[in-house]
Image (cartoon, rainbow, N blue to C red):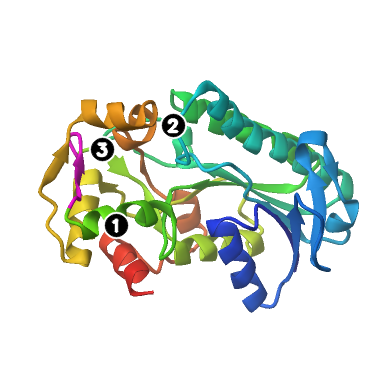
Amino acid sequence: MRVTIAGSSGLIGSSLVASLRADGHEIRRLVRRPAAGPDEFRWAPERGELDERALADADAVVNLCGTNFGDTRWTGAFKQTLRDSRITSTDVIARAVADAGVPRLLNASAVGYYGDTGERVVDETAAPGNGFLADLCRDWEAAAAPAREAGVRTVLLRSAAVISPRGGLLGRLRPLFRFGLGGRLGTGRQYLSWISLEDELDAIAFALRTETISGPVNLAGPSPATNASFTAELGRALHRPTPWVVPGFAVRALVGEIADEVALTGQRVLPAALESAGFTFHHNTIGEAIDAALSD
């Protein structure tokens, strides 16, 4: 396929470019700086600008744009940046895809759509939850409507936390655990939905080629883990004890609103759409995903 990718410089995007190219696909990259090669095309979503050559004869567009949730404390200005970096870019791409007649759009979203589910298990049929992230994900997905309404097969990639050898969740936590500072957050009973980087990339490729897949798709491993079990598995893999408990009030003091939106809450999400379409996971437990990431 000819696949145009927005957000190709991030953790998932850069890996997806390499993976799809290795499978023989032609990749075009949307960039916000001057194009530096024949596979790059300039766009400026904040101005509604996108080089139409990027979509000429494209078989699919994958939009992974979005400022990282954990880059800084959530001020009002940063929360607006989180929204703008997702919703504006999605709106521009969805309209461009519809105008160009591209048959497939895969657009990023997140399992934060479901809010804090507690012990409740949810799949793609569940309603949106409450909170800033849930509202953001709902509006983010709604921004893809112009493509869907034009008949484009539109897939909403509700990704869980990606367990990767580089960056992401492990990139933040590995140094702490190596120094013996790992421990559960709050009660440790909150669920972490996760997916290995290998499965994330394979699931995106699977959604690209599987014509029966459309609408929301949970990119999440088949067995969500509690914070306590994730902590224990990461400690085991790094051969470090994890005796510490960080009380909820301390987490809130350290990171502010992120505590009640991410660290002390969670989603117990199942990948029903992927599994019903026949997708097979490489890593079925959080321990398998951590071991694979740390062995890379």
Q: Which residue is mark 1?
A: 175
Q: Give the structural element (helix, strand or loop) at label 2.
A: loop
| Snapshot quadrant of residue 249 | top left
Tell me the magenta residue range.
181-188
- Nearer the viewer's eye, disc 2 or disc 3? 2
* 49 magenta-colored: no
First in sequence, mark 2 or 3: give its number. Answer: 2
275 with respect to 45 (left or right): left
Label 2 amino acid? Arg
Q: Residue at x 26, y 37 (%)?
A: 190
Label 3 amino acid? Gln
Main SS of the magenta part reads loop
Check the picture and name the quadrant holding the C terminus.
Answer: bottom left
Query: Mark 3: few, some, or many residues within 10 Å (few <14, many ≥20)?
Result: many
Q: Which residue is mark 2?
A: 73
First in sequence, mark 3 or 1: give its number. Answer: 1
- Nearer the viewer's eye, disc 3 or disc 1? 1
Q: Residue at x 46, y 28 (%)?
A: 74
**In this picture, is 151 found above or below 19?**
above
Q: Give the structural element (helix, strand or loop) at label 3.
A: loop
Residue 205 visible in this rendered orientation of the protein? no
